[in-house]
Image: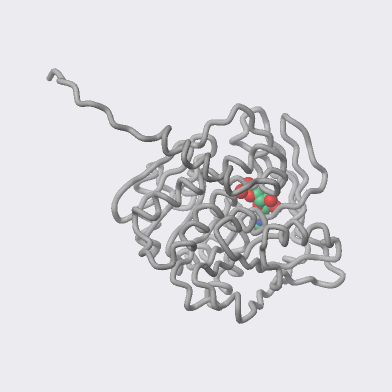
Amino acid sequence: MSLTVVGSIAFDAVKTPFGAREKMLGGSAVHFALAASFFGDVRVVGPVGDDFGASEYEVLRARGVNTDDVEHIPGGKTFFWAGEYGENLNDRETLDTQLGVFGDFAPKLSEASRACDVLFLANIQPDLQREVRQQCAGARFVALDSMNLWIETAPDSLRETIAGVDAVMLNDAEVRQLTGEASLLRAAREIMSWGPSAVVCKQGEYGAALFDADGFFALPAYPLERVVDPTGAGDSFAGGLVGYLAAHPDEGIGSPLLRGAMAYGTTLGSFNVEEFGTERIQKLTGDEVSARVDDLERMTRFDGAPVALRG
Ligand code: AMP
């Protein structure tokens, strides 16, 4: 498979009810790439500063992620994000965002990254996402993530970027904010009328819903006794979903494949939240992923016998 992701490569400071980390590897492209690496080759595109060292590269390379297009900007500082979660881990507050090397980043993709079959535009400024999309003109499937910051500060650019992709993955609040529609179904249909053929609404601990031409499909989140840090769950979910699609190059991307992809996305997202940052995915094995997907499939199978109803 050939899968390219562009997005943030970051240091994160995170506080949750279960502990804190002052500076850990993060970023939308990093979480995505680590999750997608279970399915095959992934190339990461994004800038880093002088503070991004050998141990950070090693986390990616240890999982076989290709970092040739990680651009080191001399004298620059790596993107930094700080956030805090309350008792309800579905809600978080951004405490700090320092763009650093993203301030004047102009993506320059290598020939190999441009030639990708599948492209993921992880969460960054939508103009940058569009530039990358244009460089990967031959990609057969392109998906995009974004966030409230860009919906509020660059709505026209985001909408233009969305018009050029096949699938949009946002959380439910973002889908509503983007469209002004309270109903997720109406909101998803509105987004699909701009161009994409599928919309995935992430709903945190409640799971995720897929809207496409065939209708609707939803999966609950895999139930966990303990969630330590939700940071990167959405990107890991996307990495599982898009990685699965990229690993099926000979199948058309319709509902059956997308439903399988939802199960892998749900599973990778669930592992990500078990520890801080990338800590859990770094030691995750393919066998653990397969076992949890089987479990999820067993839990969500439904075969209710009919019953006579009155009225
Ligand atoms: P998620 O929890 O999946 O929504 O993604 C969390 C990751 O997104 C963190 O590792 C952050 O470094 C990264 N992130 C946060 N804010 C931004 C932003 N404005 N642009 C790009 N990446 C961001």
215 and 292: which is toward the camera: 292
What residue lies at 61% left-to-right and 56% top-to-bottom? 32
Which residue is the extreme one toward the front?
A: 287
- Is residue 285 rendered to the left or right of residue 265? right
Q: In which quarter of the view is residue 44 placed?
A: bottom right
Count of labels shown? 0
What residue lies at 77% left-to-right and 53% top-to-bottom? 11
Image location of residue 162, percent across then percent down? 47, 63
Q: In which quarter of the view is residue 91 placed?
A: top right
What residue lies at 52% left-to-right and 58% top-to-bottom? 243
49 and 30: which is toward the camera: 30
Which residue is the extreme one toward the bottom?
A: 111
- Is residue 63 rendered to the left or right of residue 221? right
Image location of residue 194, percent across then percent down? 39, 63
What residue lies at 72% left-to-right and 45% top-to-bottom? 279
Which residue is the extreme one toward the left?
A: 311
- Is residue 286 rendered to the left or right of residue 69? left
Q: How has the structure been colored for display?
A: one colour
Image location of residue 131, percent across then percent down? 58, 74
For residue 250, above or below residue 212: below
Image location of residue 186, percent across then percent down? 35, 48
For residue 5, above or below residue 188: below
* Picture quarter with the C terminus: top left
- Is residue 299 rendered to the left or right of residue 289? left
56 and 167: which is toward the camera: 56
